[in-house]
Amino acid sequence: MRSIIVDDEASARAIVAELCKTIPDMEVRAEFPNALEALKFLKDNQVDLIFLDIHMPKLTGIDFIETLQNPPKIVLTTSDKNFAIEAYEYSFIVDYLVKPISQERFQKCIVKLNAAFNQVLPFTSFGTKTERDQELYINIDRRLIKLKFNDILLIEAKGDYIEIQTLGKRYRVHSTLKKIKDKLPESRFLQIHRSFIINFTQIVDIQDNSVLIEKSVIPISRSNRPELMQRLNLL
Amino acid sequence: MEHPNLDYIKEISGGNEVFEKKFLNIIQTEFPKEKEEYMENLESEKLDESAKIVHKIKHKLGILGLQEGYRLAIKYEEDLKYGDTKLQGQFHEILHTVEQFILKIA
């Protein structure tokens, strides 16, 4: 889980960062003392989760949320209980932590987050893997979200989760690479590493033992390389 | 009268002394700045701005285990937004207690 912390109080950021260290698979990528710096970071970096303070000078947490085009999951951290109802108007806000945050309450938040990054429910329009009009539905927060196979760039295994990267968005789903591989058309998707399946129609280039897909460099394992090379229309 | 303690910080650190030291350094830097900012706003009668700083200080009172102080700060913050400063004296006593504690642990 790639996260950032946005809070104008250094003490508050330090506490959240320390609490995050107790969570396996939680990576705090950066901390910001204001929302503007966080926005700059998010222009070039994708994250799964933001720990966000509401009361900040210049741009408040709520203003910040309104500016996000594809918001990741957000956990609000605040000393003010009054915003709780407003917070839950946003589907991507998973929890609301009142500072100072206890370890016990933080653990509950992580349980909520794990539930939010939910399970894959894949099926196709016709119940079979036809090449035309194929799509995959994933379950995020009890919403079935349709992903067109054409839009999927790659899928990465991350512990008990998989991360599906599409053009412009990432989805974290509780599932395995094997499960999703069975639902994807073999003519377009290929496992090139034990942790990666790629849409090989989206390859930009191949260099040595890696593939470039959009801006992601994906390793090719030695055992999967021959099959990949076989599939390419080499001159 | 209640006294500040490090119970919460020790709970969060799980015995990590490096974090405890780093965290106390942050508090020692952050608290005096916030107090100064609060006092300046109060003296300039910018009570809305004072309330915003009380909001931040309130979090530190919670961190230092000052439960009564935390509750008083919630009330004081709201009062300040309406121009009411009657809890000022009690709040300043709490600030003084925290200042003394910070000096002691420095």
Image (tube, helix red, strand yellow):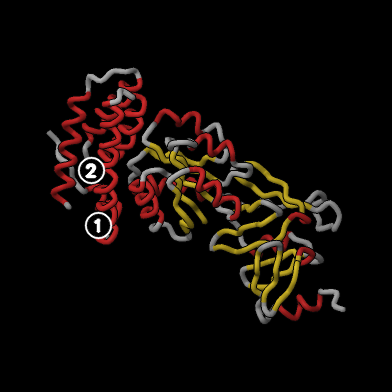
- Residue shown at the point (31%, 29%) measured from the top left: B41
* Image: A159 above or below A117: below
Sequence-wise first label, 2 or 1? 1
Above or below, A175 relative to A33: below
Q: Report the residue marked by disc 1.
A: B21
Which residue is nearer to you in this view: B69 or A110? B69
Image position of A124 with respect to A235: above or below: above
Amino acid type of the residue tagged 2 in the rendering: Leu
Give the amino acid at mark 1. Lys
For disc 2, the marked residue is B64
**Residue that appears at 18% across and 25% down:** B89
**Gap between marks 2 and 1, in whole Å?**
14 Å
Q: Seen in the image, is B61 located left or right of residue A210?
A: left
Rendered location of residue A156, percent (x, y): 62, 63
Label 1 marks a residue whose chain is: B
Q: Secondary structure at mark 2?
A: loop
Marked residue chain, label 2: B
Q: Residue at x 32, y 29 (%)?
A: B50
Q: Secondary structure at mark 1?
A: helix
Q: Residue at x 39, y 53 (%)?
A: A17
Is circle 2 on the same chain as circle 1? yes
Quarter of the figure with the C terminus of chain A: bottom right
Disc 2 residue crowd, few under 14, some 14–19, many 20+, Cα 10 Å: many
Asked if residue A173 can be seen in this view, the reply is no
| As drawn, A171 above or below A80 | below
